[in-house]
Image: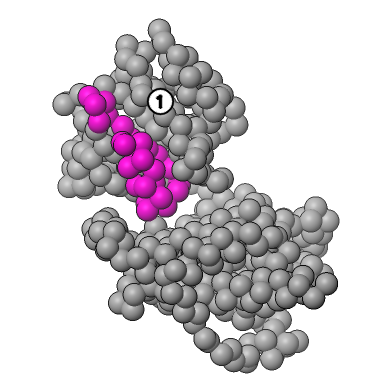
Amino acid sequence: MACENNQLLLEGYFDGELDLVRSVEFEEHLKTCPDCAGELRGKNALRDSLRAANLYERAPESLRSRIRAALPAEARPQPIPMPRRPVLEWLAVAAAILIAVFLGARVLPNIGGQTENLVAEEIVASHIRSLQPGHLYDVESTDRHTVKPWFDGKLDFAPPVVDLKDQGFPLVGGRLDYVDHRNVAALVYQRQKHFINVFVWPQDPKTSMRPGVQSIQGYNLVSWSHDGMDFCAASDLNVAELRQFSQMLQQ
Amino acid sequence: MGEQQRGAGSAGSFEQVVLPHLDAAYNLARWLVRNPHDAEDIVQEAYLRAFKFFGSYQGGDARAWVLKIVRNTCYSFFEKNRPAELAEEFDEKIHTADTENADAEAALLKSADSRMLGEALDKLPVNFREVIVLRELEGMSYKEIAEVTGVPMGTVMSGLARARAQLRERLLLARAKEEQRGLRK
């Protein structure tokens, strides 16, 4: 059982819901508290079995058609044509976009360097794109000795490729990607049903992402530098596990 | 009706916004009422309600919006048909494992199979069942769960802590029983 003061913190940490500061503090606590560490292993075990058990119940096809059939009969009249003002509406949209861009430009630098944030957003976009069917990898392999040489001649650097299968993060492939005006390596790992893209490129003081964690559109990013390379891991995985993953990569 | 259709138009059509969450809706209803037949009826009713209220949908998290309606429909169903389900009081002995046991316990939990997990989940009180389903099966954040269940995020967190403790307790109990049965054979 978790030590008394930390039961809720442990829950929040386990669910990746603590903010960065508290998450780091709690990791420190975990190092010195076998009770909480044991409890965390129990929670992980429970979650692993829940995931493996495939308890998700999908809607039967018959229900789908039943609902489609019921909707028009009971509640779907023909749409009543509304007077439209296309030009005004488009102007409103354009104005909204301008305001959003303006606000964005003003607010973002407070979070980090502006370029840095653009890079982060590019990475998130790239991560999302990679999850579309058929975009995840150019080379599909769980063997790092296949993935690493694949990058030869495609990049002007050799990205370090490690497999973390035994730690629960198997390597599933690699991909050439393009971030911040340069070719980068994207290594794809898997954690249960979550995919993690690790983007790697040679360190560049101009665009270097500050090491740390951030969250964009519900995706978590962990960035770090190691051996002259910049790394950024992107995933919908929770912060705690993603950080754990990034630490393993750095070892 | 015209107004409602209008609201629908501004955030995408009902078809685009609400229908894609049918699996999520069914999964939640199925685990809350625990049988496929009632779950289908409830989802259908919830979808008709959703259609009716679609005018008030302001955009935002559509899945949470749909699931909130599904949940409310389930609870109305309970009030009408199974009031005991909502009134049930559960003794809460939170399991206290000492640290040496923690790993043995984790191993036991890991070996639990699908049927055992399903049964243990079925036996949780409905308020615990729903947070587990939303968090572990649906993968929702505390914020999303708070939106669906209409409670503060802190309550989601403490609810999850208690729900997991109880689920674990029940699983370990089921494992122990199984072993006993095995010994008797």
Given residues B88 and A40, the one toward you in this image is A40
On screen, residue B99 versus residue B176, left or right, reads: left
Occupied quadrant, residue A13? bottom left
On screen, residue A147 versus residue B20, left or right, reads: left
Q: Does residue A149 appear in the picture of this structure?
A: yes
| Residue A102 position within the rendered picture, expressed as x and y whole percent measured from the top left | 24, 42
The answer to whether A203 is drawn above or below residue B75 in the figure is above
On screen, residue A69 versus residue A238, left or right, reads: right
The answer to whether B77 is drawn above or below residue A15 in the figure is below
Q: Which segment did they paint magenta?
A: A226-251
| Residue A114 position within the rendered picture, expressed as x and y whole percent measured from the top left | 20, 37
Q: Is residue A229 magenta?
A: yes
| Residue B155 position within the rendered picture, expressed as x and y whole percent measured from the top left | 42, 77
Instruction: Indicate how the structure is coloured in the image.
Output: one colour
Q: Amino acid at mark 1?
A: Val
> What residue is pinned by disc 1?
A161
Residue located 65% across and 62% down the image:
B112
Label 1 crowding class (10 Å Cα cut-off): few <14, some 14-19, many 20+? some
